Image: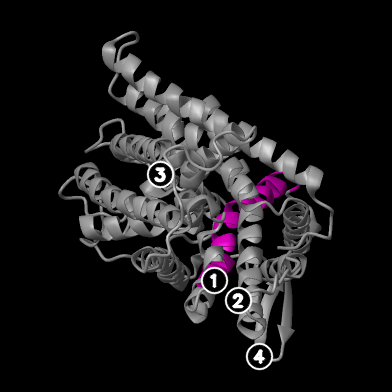
């Protein structure tokens, strides 16, 4: 979903270069005020999109985050981060049009809205933060996939050899294999336009998250739950505060759906006004999302207590439901194979776009070489081939060097949460509503932004500390779990 929120930047580039967009002519009377085909989305379709984009691999680390924070701090941080993100998203719905939220010009993407309301300097800052977030998320996805594949191996090992066998496996073969698959898929220039991709991702993401919650509840109901506490895991430990900071980053990572808000809003009918319908969708979808997050975090912590694993599904390896855990891990792999491409396409596209602008006459960069193998025809661009391959190789190497699931998610959450999910939406709202400086509302909005900034700062410091500590104890190419 994120790719379509950024796609309009590249659609404009296509139009400038003379390519046909949109490819089909629309009959008179079947278009909206911007000349595009009439939108048919409703509050319920928007809710479905919001829920789909918010339920991802990040929810699997929420139980671990709750274990580090304890019941009181854990529930508070979870509710604060989710409601801050929802409040900012509600304000963001009024920025879909500029300058008037009902009759103004449409902003088709998050970046367009930033440029319209906040100007070029903030537009560049947003671009750097957005593409940095998207570029690094490939590492997190690679680590998550490798851990899921190792979990399947361990499950089969326990089934054959019994629960007492340590069943230690290296994640490096899975990281390399996943990297090769993604390098091959990345050569498809329009991979993100395959409509079935988001549908498959939606089904699988709901599948593995629901299995995690269901198995946790089953463990609790049967009386095999873990020991929990108000203060969380080992409150006397010297690393306690750092783990709490990293846990806050994991929570923030799970609350980052606002980047696709304009993409979702752009599917809605013009009447009633999109901003009013979207506010309802954000409220309903956000409430469901929050309930789901609370279920994942609290049930997982209650099921495992102080021994809650970083990835919730990893804790069920010794249970009898081997096939269900394996199915959930397969869902994760299938989801992330597609999601990796969807989220990395903007990074590929922006680098290739800048290269074409910088060297417009270079054959290496611009020439499409037709290839035919039997009845199959396709084009190979040497720059696309070399650049996307190099990106995949670098992501794979970094994932091997930093195989730390929760700390990597915390770092990703810290990078994106405050600037992209909270700060910029609040600033756009202040500009749109012309809220005066030093007024009560101005102070309130900036206080919320500052508190979220502190959470992101703490999350970044906790994640970096965790990565540093992990690297000191980690022997390259010898990591097993």
What distance separates the C-alpha of mark 4 from that of mark 1?
36 Å
Residue at 40% of width from left, 56% of height from top? 296
Assign a secondary structure to mark 3. Answer: helix
- For marks 3 and 4 on the same chain, the one whose residue lies earlier in the sequence: 3
Q: Residues within 10 Å of mark 3 (few under 14, many from 20)?
A: many
Instruction: Say whether disc 2 or disc 1 marks the residue closer to the N-terminus.
Output: 2
Find the distance from the CA under tag 3 to the CA under tag 4: 43 Å
Tell which circle, 3 or 2, labels the residue nearer the N-terminal end: 2
| Rendering coords of residue 22 (x, y %) | 42, 61
Residue under the image location 38 percent in, 19 percent down: 447
- Residue closest to the far top: 438
What is the distance, in whole Å, between disc 1 and disc 3 at their CAs? 27 Å
Residue 375's disc number: 4
60 horizontally vs 383: left or right: left
| Residue at the (51%, 74%) spot, across then down | 319
Task: Give the x, y percent position of residue 423.
Answer: 44, 28
Q: How far is the residue under mark 2 from the one under mark 1?
A: 11 Å
Residue 220 x %, y %: 37, 63
| Residue 75 location (% of width, % of height) | 37, 41
């Amino acid at each position: 979903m994120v790719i379509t929120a950024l796609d309009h930047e590249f659609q404009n580039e296509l139009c400038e270069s003379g390519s046909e967009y949109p490819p089909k002519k629309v009959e008179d009377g079947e278009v909206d005020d911007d000349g595009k085909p009439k939108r048919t989305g409703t509050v319920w379709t928007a809710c479905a999109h919001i829920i789909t984009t918010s339920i991802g691999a990040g929810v699997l680390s929420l139980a671990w985050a709750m274990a580090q924070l304890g019941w009181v701090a854990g529930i508070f941080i979870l509710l604060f981060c989710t409601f801050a993100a929802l409040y900012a998203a509600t304000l963001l719905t009024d920025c879909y049009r500029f300058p008037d939220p009902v009759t103004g010009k449409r902003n088709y993407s998050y970046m367009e809205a930033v440029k319209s309301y906040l100007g070029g300097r903030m537009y560049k800052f947003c671009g750097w933060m957005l593409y940095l977030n998207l570029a690094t998320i490939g590492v997190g996805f690679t680590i998550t996939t490798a851990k899921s594949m190792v979990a399947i191996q361990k499950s089969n090992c326990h089934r054959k050899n019994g629960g007492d066998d340590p069943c230690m496996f290296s994640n490096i073969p899975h990281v390399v294999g996943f990297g090769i698959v993604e390098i091959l898929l990345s050569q498809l220039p329009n991979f993100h336009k395959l409509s079935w991709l988001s549908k498959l991702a939606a089904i699988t993401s709901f599948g593995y998250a629901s299995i995690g919650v269901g198995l946790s509840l089953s463990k609790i109901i049967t009386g095999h739950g873990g020991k929990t506490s108000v203060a969380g895991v080992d409150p006397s430990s010297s690393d306690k505060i750092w783990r709490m900071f990293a846990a806050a980053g994991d929570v923030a990572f799970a609350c980052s759906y606002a980047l696709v808000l304009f993409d979702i809003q752009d599917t809605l009918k013009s009447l009633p006004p999109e901003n009013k319908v979207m506010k309802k969708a954000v409220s309903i979808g956000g409430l469901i999302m929050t309930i789901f997050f609370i279920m994942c975090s609290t049930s997982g912590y209650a099921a495992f207590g102080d021994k809650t694993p970083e990835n919730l599904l990893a804790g069920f390896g010794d249970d009898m439901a081997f096939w269900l855990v394996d199915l959930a891990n397969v869902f994760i792999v299938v989801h992330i194979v597609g999601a990796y491409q969807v989220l990395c396409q903007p990074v590929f596209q922006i680098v290739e776009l800048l290269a074409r602008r910088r060297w417009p006459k270079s054959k290496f960069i611009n020439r499409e070489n037709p290839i035919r193998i039997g009845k199959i025809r396709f084009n190979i661009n040497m720059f696309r081939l070399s650049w996307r391959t190099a990106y995949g190789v670098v992501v794979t190497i970094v994932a091997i060097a930093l195989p730390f699931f929760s700390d990597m998610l915390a770092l990703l959450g810290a990078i994106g949460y405050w600037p992209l999910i909270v700060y910029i939406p609040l600033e756009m709202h202040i500009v749109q509503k012309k809220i005066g400086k030093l007024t009560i509302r101005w102070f309130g909005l900036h206080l919320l932004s500052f508190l979220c900034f502190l959470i992101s700062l703490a999350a970044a410091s906790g994640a970096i500390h965790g990565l540093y500590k992990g690297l000191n104890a980690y022997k390259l190419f010898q990591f097993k779990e």
